[in-house]
Amino acid sequence: MRPRINRWTPARRNLIFGNSIKSSLVQPHFVVSGENIDTQISGMPGINRQSVDILIETIEKDMQIGLTSHMLFLVMDEKYRDRNASYASNMETPLHVAVKQLKEKFGNEIVVMTDVCLCTGTDHGHCGIVIENEINNDLTLDELLRIGVSHAEAGADYVATSDMMDGRVRAMRKKFEELGFHSTGILSYSVKYASSFYGPFREAAESSPKFGDRRSHQMDFRSGYSEAIMEAKIDQEEGADIIMIKPGLPYLDVLRKISDEVTRPTAVYNVSGEYAMVMNSNNKKGERGKMIIEILQAFRRAGADVIVTYHAREFMQEE
Ligand code: PBG
């Protein structure tokens, strides 16, 4: 356990302890290879897939309006995908290049988070190593560590473990300590439900499973608070620096419960399907702004210290 991780830089302290909607926002981004690429994602108006050059320009502008926390997802070219997502830890992926450039440019003024999962890098789209049609938990851990370490090496502030394998936080923390990454944090998707609200994201990242689903590892939404509390406490005990609940709006009650039960800061992920609902229901910018503030305020009221949301930029621009 390293409580200093969340205090390490001014930008981390502001994100976690800043105590306002603005300071708690994290903007997600989808990074692709190539140059000058800025393609609109269908189903997620305002959110684009971007090559590194455009992504850096976008984040430069975000930084100017005070949006200083960013979460990066790699969209991997089809040709690099294989059974164990081997390319996902290559230091030359657009994600690694982007992290390096962002940290060189903005240092301790930016918080860079990176998604660690196998699903965008495997040819079958599953979050783990598949053996005879089942996801093998412990073999997957080795692959996750390989990816997490490469992100830490690139300079990520937090790796965000989104895979829902058992034991991955402990294994990651241990590995980071062995390798000297004492200030690299772990934001864990601790309470992540198998949800129908991830649709637009999976299209954006081309990460839908080619067969089966994610219900053998992501949580059953019929489960009660005890299951959610157990997952959150396990991750806390294993050394997670931030405990995330996902999705957001349908699970506000769970967020409230978990924030009361854990001592680590909590985050909520206002996911792609929730974003699409708002964007499709109201396309007048000013009026939509009112919906967004109401939603973000609800997350704060329910106890979220950190809010990952595709609305972050629009909120910062409007306020
Ligand atoms: C990767 C991951 C997913 C999301 C974040 N990380 C997809 C999934 O679990 O299928 C979803 C985010 C969103 O819907 O906005 N495992």
Image (spheres, helix red, strand yellow):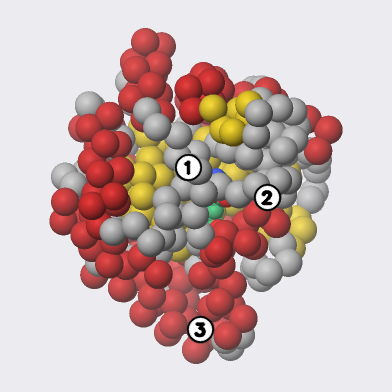
- The verdict on label 1 being within 8 Å of ligand 1 is no
Q: Is mark 2 within 8 Å of ligand 1?
A: yes
- The three-letter code of the residue at mark 1 reads His
User: Residue 288: which disc?
Assistant: 3
Does the image show residue 95?
no
Going by the numbered disc 2, the residue's amino acid type is Ser
Q: Nearer the viewer, mark 3 or mark 2?
A: 2
Element class at badge 2: loop
Few, some or many residues within 10 Å of mark 3 (<14, 14–19, 20+): some
Quadrant of the drawing holding the C terminus: bottom left
Establish whether ligand 1 lies closer than 8 Å to the Cβ of label 3.
no
Judge depth for marks 2 and 1 and give the one in front.
1
Q: Which residue sits at x=62%, y=57%?
A: 201
Q: Given the image, on which type of amino acid does mark 3 rest? A: Arg
Q: Whole-Å distance between the Cαs marked 3 and 2?
A: 30 Å
* Labels 3 & 2 near each other (Cβ < 8 A): no
Reading the chain from its start, which is encountered first: label 3 or label 2? Answer: 2
- Circle nearer the viewer, 1 or 3: 1
